[in-house]
Each structure stands twice: as C-alpha cells, then as structure tokens.
Image: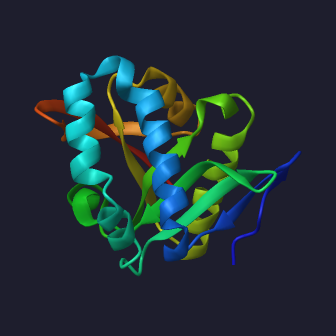
Amino acid sequence: MCRAYFFEYMNIKEISRADVPVLRELAIRIFVDTFSESNTPENMNAFLESDYRVECFEQDFNDDSARHFFIVDNETPVGYLRVRKNSEADHYLGTNTMEIHRLYVDKRFHGKNAGALLMQHALDIAKVRQVDWVWLGVWEKNLRALRFYEKWGFERFSEHVFQMGDDAQIDWLLKKKMS
C-alpha cells in the first residue's frame, strides 16, 4: 500500500464515489482559476458542461484501474490526483503504463509542495504497480505545469487534441521511465 505523505499540515487521502460532490466543486474551481484567462467564457462553459458534470465524475469511479486522492490542508481539500490505466499511449510506450490523468492544486497552494506531494504519491503508485512508464497530457500553453513536469523528469513524446468548447487545443504527451 502507498504511504501517506505529510508536509506541515497537508496530507493525502484516497477518496471514493461519496466524495464526488466535493471533488467536482474543487475541480471546477481549480480548472476555472487555471484556464479562464486563456479561454473564452463560452468555451470554458461548454467544456465544464460536457466534461465536469456530476455523472462524469461518478463514472470515473467505475474504472477499476483508477484511484483518486485529495491533498488536504487541515481536512480541507486543496488539490486532487487521479491515476489510471489508459491505452492511448500504448503505441508509443507499450502496455505497461500508468497515466496521471489529473493532478491539480488550488493556486493558493502553489509553491507549498502540494503538487510535489501528489506527484510523489503518483510515482509511488506506479512503483507498486511496477509499470515501465508513467505518462500524462498537459496543455502546450500551460508553462507552469510544463516546468513542474520537467523538474520531475518527464519528457515530451507526442501530442493530442484537447477539445475546449469549439477550440481544438494541443496537449503535449509527456513520459517518465520507471523501470
């Protein structure tokens, strides 16, 4: 089992379907804070209405390969992580992979190691699963996130389209060798 990480007052806890309302509220707030300045209100609303519906979050818990975590500050969620098996990168990396599907932290906790704690937790899960590669997608214009992932040893290997309303944006696919 993966260990819990503690940094001052923050810790990581695994969450379940019962946590969907809190997870969804946090996810929407962080997504809007992170991307609203770079996207039109119409595209933001279209994306949230299609991909951030309660049903979408509930469905995420139907995937047996996925695990979901909050990082909490004094019991208040300030970020979240979702890891899963996803075959999208199999053509490039083989089938023994794990995707970091979501790793988001409230901007008030940037620079306070919340992202680092979530990343280390994801990599610990990858070690337990004995995967060869960990991979993720990140918007090519999200320079802060790109720098973060680069510090953790991720490198670009491909890209795909991320549909934000009527705007076809480019996500870079990044990989990290585990074994």
Q: Name the residue located 41 percent from the left edge and 33 percent from the top edge.
A: 32
Specify the farthest residue to the right. Answer: 8
Left or right: where 15 falls relative to 38: right
The x and y percentages for residue 80 are 56, 52
Quadrant location, the N terminus:
bottom right
Front residue of this view, candidates 98 and 54: 54
The x and y percentages for residue 92 are 25, 54
Left or right: where 155 falls relative to 159: right
Q: Quadrant of residue 105?
A: top right
The x and y percentages for residue 93 are 31, 58
Q: Quadrant of residue 75?
A: bottom right
* Above or below 75: residue 137: above
Q: Name the residue located 86 percent from the left edge and 48 percent from the top edge.
A: 9
Q: Name the residue located 26 percent from the left edge and 25 percent from the top edge.
A: 41
Number of marks drawn: 0
Q: Quadrant of residue 162?
A: top left
Left or right: where 66 falls relative to 168: right
The x and y percentages for residue 52 are 33, 52
Residue 131 appears anywhere in the view: yes
Specify the farthest residue to the top. Answer: 37
* Way the structure is coloured: rainbow
Specify the farthest residue to the left. Answer: 166
* Above or below 113: residue 10: below
Left or right: where 167 falls relative to 6: left
Q: Name the residue located 60 percent from the left edge and 30 percent from the top edge.
A: 107
Residue 132 appears anywhere in the view: no
